[in-house]
Image (cartoon, helix red, strand yellow):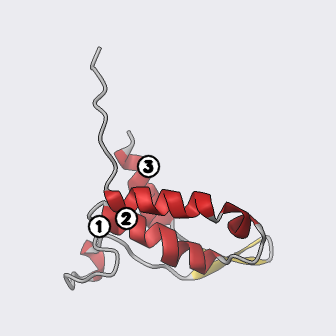
Amino acid sequence: MREARLMTAPDQVLELVERFDRNLDDYRSGRYKEAQVRTEFIDPFFVALGWDVHNVKGYAEAYKDVVHEDSIRVSGRLRRRIGRLMGWCMSCMG
């Protein structure tokens, strides 16, 4: 059986967790929008892990770390599609 190795989280991730915890009531209030979550937490999280979220390297569409997709309607509500990102994340988890 393989022994699990623990990694320490980057300081930026720890700061995101602390900020989220500190302001949790605001985030649960219903006034906090999905776009805000992405801008303030999701994108910085992946940047802290070394992803080129904003395509600073200028890669072609097929080679980008993150591809921002169009919104789709789910049960009459507009939702962002993050399938490519989530599919990649799930494949990394085994």
The residue beneath circle 2 is 46
Are there few (<14), some (14-19), or many (20+) residues within 10 Å of tag 3? few
- What residue is rendered at 31% in x and 44% in y? 8
Q: Which mark is residue 90?
A: 3
Could you tell which of marks 2 and 3 lies nearer the N-terminus?
Answer: 2
Q: Amino acid at mark 2?
A: Phe
Are there few (<14), some (14-19), or many (20+) residues within 10 Å of tag 2? some
- Depth check: give the residue in front, 44 or 24: 24
The location of residue 60, given as percent across then percent down, is 24, 82
Query: Real-space Cα distance between discs 2 and 1?
Result: 5 Å
Q: Nearer the viewer's eye, disc 3 or disc 1?
A: 1
Query: Real-space Cα distance between discs 3 and 1?
Result: 16 Å
Q: Nearer the viewer's eye, disc 2 or disc 3?
A: 2
The residue beneath circle 1 is 51
| Disc 2 to disc 1: CB gap under 8 Å | yes
Q: Amino acid at mark 3?
A: Met
Could you tell which of marks 2 and 1 lies nearer the N-terminus?
Answer: 2
The location of residue 10, given as percent across then percent down, is 31, 55
Q: Amino acid at mark 1?
A: Trp
| Disc 2 to disc 3: CB gap under 8 Å | no
